[in-house]
Image: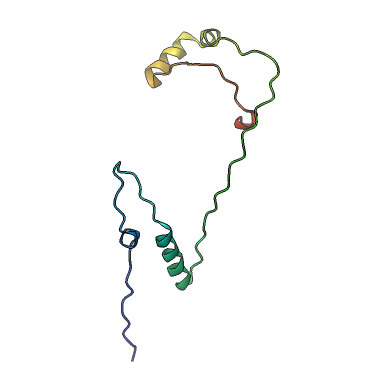
Amino acid sequence: MAEATEPAKVETIAEVTDAVPAADGGNVWPDEAAESAFLAEARTNGETPQVATVTAAEPEVENETDGKELPPLDDLVKRIPPDVRDVLDDLFRAKFTGVRRVPKKSLKT
């Protein structure tokens, strides 16, 4: 005869941490105790949860400049055909605010 086993008690993260929703309606992250309890339970179930590690971002290095000065904003806006500017304004309410250099690593190659 098969033995009857007790059903396992399943606790949600909210039950473990007694978390109160954030006042602004944002997400509430579990604390260290809740996370370690989750990882311990996963290991007892034979699972191997993957823990994400956070690495510090490399400091952004200023691009090498070619010595050329950037053109004035008005000159660049005048290069855009008027009908394209109208469509941009209608669809996106696009407002051109400044001229900036883009790092080479941000561009597709």
Residue depicted at 51% across the width and 16% down the height = 98
Residue positioned most to the bottom: 1
Query: In which image quadrant can residue 68 be found?
Result: top right
Counting from the top left corner in percent of width and height, residue 108 is at 61, 31
Q: What count of labels does the image hold? A: 0
Query: In which image quadrant can residue 10 be found?
Result: bottom left
Depth check: give the residue in front, 75 or 2: 75
Counting from the top left corner in percent of width and height, residue 78 is at 52, 7
Depth check: give the residue in front, 18 or 6: 18
Residue depicted at 41% across the width and 62% down the height = 33
Counting from the top left corner in percent of width and height, residue 20 is at 29, 52
Image-based side of 63 in relation to 22, left or right: right
Residue depicted at 33% across the width and 92% down the height = 1
Image-based side of 76 in relation to 18, left or right: right
Q: Is residue 103 above or below residue 21?
A: above
Question: Which quadrant holds the C terminus?
Answer: top right
Depth check: give the residue in front, 60 or 92: 60
